[in-house]
Image (tube, rainbow, N blue to C red):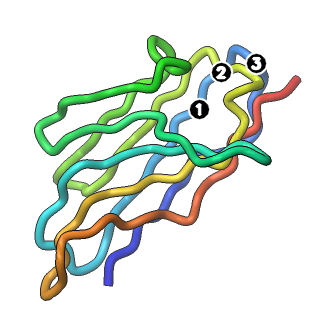
Amino acid sequence: QVQLVESGGGLVQPGGSLRLSCAASGSISSLYDMRWYRQAPGKQRVLVADISSDGTTNYADPVKGRFTISRDNAKKTVYLQMNSLKPEDTAVYYCSADIVAYGLAYRAYWGQGTQVTVSS
């Protein structure tokens, strides 16, 4: 069984920073791309950033220059450093990872989400 557990969300003032973490655990044979998504109230879930197993990164335009995705392969953990936060960054943030678990096929797994609220 594979689990992704996010942490680090909370309430922050505009211009502030937060760091999200997402740790993968369980019977993991191989860990590939890892991603952060967000879903604002009444809106669809959208991709924020992704990072490949070799460290190649991509960002959605609204967060370029403010957010940084990184990973620690030894800890099976992906991070999202969020700086210069804006009210429009308010959303539930989800991590996702492409994983081959022992005895199972390659598939995407999801975390439960962590709330980020940017407000004064």
Is residue 106 toward the left or the right of residue 59 in the image? left
Task: Tell me what residue is drawn at x 18 percent, y 50 percent.
Answer: 73
Q: Quadrant of the N terminus?
A: bottom left
Give the SS element for disc 2.
loop
Q: Reply above or below: 77 against 86.
A: below
Q: Which residue is mark 1?
A: 18
Residue 51 percent location from the top left of the image:
27, 38
* Within-10-Å neighbours for mark 2: few <14, some 14–19, many 20+: many
Residue 34 percent location from the top left of the image:
31, 48
Task: Tell me what residue is drawn at x 19 percent, y 30 percent.
Answer: 56
Please tell me which of labels 2 and 3 falls first in the chain.
3
Is residue 88 toward the left or the right of residue 76 in the image? right
Q: CA distance from mark 1 to mark 3?
A: 11 Å
Query: Which quadrant would residue 54 be assigned to in this image?
Result: top left
Residue 1: mark: none
- Looking at the image, do the residues carrying marks 1 and 2 touch, with CB atoms under 8 Å apart? yes
- Looking at the image, do the residues carrying marks 2 and 3 touch, with CB atoms under 8 Å apart? yes
Q: Which residue is mark 3?
A: 14
| Residue type, label 2 | Leu
Residue 30 percent location from the top left of the image:
12, 65
Q: Reply above or below: 16 against 19.
A: above
Please tell me which of labels 1 and 2 falls first in the chain.
1
Q: Which residue is mark 2?
A: 85
Task: Tell me what residue is drawn at x 37 percent, y 67 percent.
Answer: 109
Is residue 77 toward the left or the right of residue 94 in the image? left
Query: Which quadrant would residue 65 be assigned to in this image?
Result: top left
Please name whichever residue, 58 or 9, is drawn nearer the observer in this view of the structure. 58
| Residue type, label 1 | Leu
Give the SS element for disc 3.
loop
Q: CA distance from mark 2 to mark 3?
A: 5 Å
Mark toward the viewer: 1 or 2 = 2
